[in-house]
């Protein structure tokens, strides 16, 4: 495993501190009728107390949201810096051979899998972008958290661009691909489950001082980072990597390797935020609620795998996919110090880490490695 991504999301959580102080004063009273309002150049800042890092909070904070430092969560700033070293765009990857592969080398079962993976991912990444931008980011009360999440919003949009680029390059029927989740129950099931779990907190004005609401928000963010990104996305590219191992659809697979590297960070960041949130707010997940969440996620993933891999392809099957989901799910639970939901699950895809290692396929970035530092090895936490 490469040191670049080691320990992301696994660093011990700092001891929570108490809040207080650092608030902005109330706005100045409105001027009386007939009295000229002070011009901006005449305004003098009040003597505000300096912000103390220990007063910051994940949510429910009262420190100035427009002042970046001092950091209470320096790891969040490091995530932002690391994310920017991952920069890439889909047009930089050579897709010429993929056009040949898709139309002349894939068999019907492989094309069925490929198209439906793409159909699921396109819808999922829009949902991811909206969730982090509209449901999560606005609830944060420390700017260093929002800064990384702003980058994440962009990356989710970049991922959507990537799928669209693949669809256009391969000359797939856009209407068919984008509407597929509406007509295929196994794809719709995952999207519907995510919508149900995420939309509960997709509104401003949520009172997070209310304990049940806060629990709902934390569980929703855990679902998003740990399952939606950390299991479904993380595991979602594997069928394409199975093609890549056989020399098929290598351009698409390389695109997905870059997306997966982003998702690794998204998952690690989200889990870190949720862990610290639980500590700061002194709440714990309801085990029954967590167990229900895992069961739902597994059922949806199994239905999806049985559909996209209704006919096994060489080197890959629905059983392998589901087994790997369970294995990754256990890892996410351990990252949150929760009980493993699927005891005994084994790594079904021992080739995954090596296959997804970007250094093996580093071709288009040869001239850009120094500029973007994109040549790092992937790690799959
Ligand atoms: Fe994404
Ligand atoms: Fe993501």
Image (tube, helix red, strand yellow):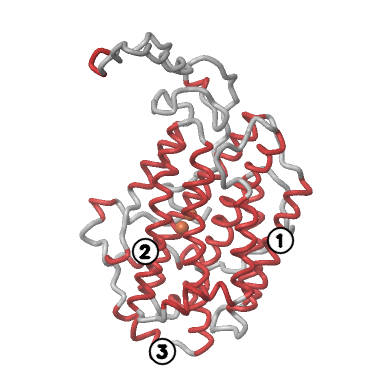
Q: Quadrant of residue 376?
A: bottom left
Q: Quadrant of residue 173?
A: bottom left
Give SS at disc 3. helix
Residue placed furthest toward the top:
47
As drawn, 249 above or below 360? below
Question: For disc 2, does the CB lie below 8 Å from ligand 1?
Answer: no
Task: Give the left or right position of residue 43, taking residue 257 as reference.
Answer: left
In this orientation, which residue lies closer to the viewer: 356 or 40? 40
Question: For disc 3, does the CB lie below 8 Å from ligand 1?
Answer: no
Residue found 28% across the figure and 66% down from its top:
91
User: To which residue does mark 3 refer?
Assistant: 105
Gap in angstroms between the C-alphas marked 1 and 2: 29 Å
x, y percent for residue 165: 34, 70
Give SS at disc 2. helix
Q: Earlier in the sequence, mark 1 or mark 2?
A: 2
Question: Which dot, 3 or 2, sits closer to the camera?
Answer: 2
x, y percent for residue 80: 39, 41
Q: Earlier in the sequence, mark 3 or mark 2?
A: 3
For label 2, count other residues whose C-alpha is less than 10 Å away and answer few (under 14), some (14-19) or many (20+): some
Total labels drawn: 3
For label 1, count other residues whose C-alpha is less than 10 Å away and answer few (under 14), some (14-19) or many (20+): some
User: To which residue does mark 2 refer?
Assistant: 161
- On residue 296, the disc is 1
x, y percent for residue 344: 73, 60
Gap in angstroms between the C-alphas marked 1 and 3: 36 Å
Residue placed furthest toward the right:
288
Gap in angstroms between the C-alphas marked 3 and 2: 25 Å
Question: For disc 1, does the CB lie below 8 Å from ligand 2?
Answer: no
Give SS at disc 1. helix
x, y percent for residue 359: 35, 62
For label 3, count other residues whose C-alpha is less than 10 Å away and answer few (under 14), some (14-19) or many (20+): some
Residue found 63% across the figure and 42% down from its top:
217
């Amino acid at each position: 495993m490469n040191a670049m991504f080691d320990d992301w999301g696994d660093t011990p959580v700092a001891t929570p501190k108490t809040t207080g102080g650092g608030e902005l004063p109330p706005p100045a009273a409105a001027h009386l009728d007939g009295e000229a309002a002070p011009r901006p150049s005449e305004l003098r800042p009040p003597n505000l107390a300096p912000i103390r890092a220990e007063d910051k909070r994940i949510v429910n904070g009262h420190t100035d949201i427009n002042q970046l430092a001092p950091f209470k969560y320096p790891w969040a700033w490091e995530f932002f810096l690391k994310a920017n070293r991952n920069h890439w765009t889909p047009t930089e990857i050579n897709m010429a051979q993929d056009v040949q592969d898709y139309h002349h080398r894939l068999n019907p079962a492989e094309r069925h899998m490929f198209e439906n993976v793409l159909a699921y991912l396109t819808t999922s990444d829009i949902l991811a972008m909206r969730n982090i931008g509209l449901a999560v980011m606005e609830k944060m009360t420390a700017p260093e958290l929002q800064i990384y999440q702003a980058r994440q919003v962009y990356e989710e949009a970049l991922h959507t661009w990537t799928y669209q680029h693949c669809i256009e390059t391969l000359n797939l029927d856009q209407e068919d691909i984008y509407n597929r989740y509406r007509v295929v129950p196994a794809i719709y099931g995952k999207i519907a489950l995510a919508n149900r779990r995420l939309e509960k907190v997709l509104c401003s004005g949520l009172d997070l001082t209310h304990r049940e609401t806060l629990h709902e928000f934390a569980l929703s963010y855990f679902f998003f980072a740990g399952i939606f990104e950390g299991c479904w996305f993380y595991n979602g590219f594997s069928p394409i990597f199975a093609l890549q191992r056989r020399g098929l659809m290598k351009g698409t697979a390389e695109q997905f390797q870059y997306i997966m590297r982003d998702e690794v960070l998204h998952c690690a960041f989200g889990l870190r935020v949720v862990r610290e949130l639980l500590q700061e707010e002194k709440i714990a997940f309801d085990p029954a609620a967590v167990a229900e969440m895992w069961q739902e996620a597994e059922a949806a993933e199994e239905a999806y795998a049985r559909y996209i891999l209704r006919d096994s392809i060489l080197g890959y099957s629905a059983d392998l996919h589901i087994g790997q989901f369970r294995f990754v799910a256990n890892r996410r639970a351990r990252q949150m110090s929760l009980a493993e939901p699927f005891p005994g699950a084994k790594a079904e895809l021992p080739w995954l880490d090596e296959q997804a290692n970007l250094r093996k396929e580093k071709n288009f970035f040869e001239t850009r490695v120094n500029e973007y530092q994109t040549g790092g090895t992937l790690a799959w936490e």
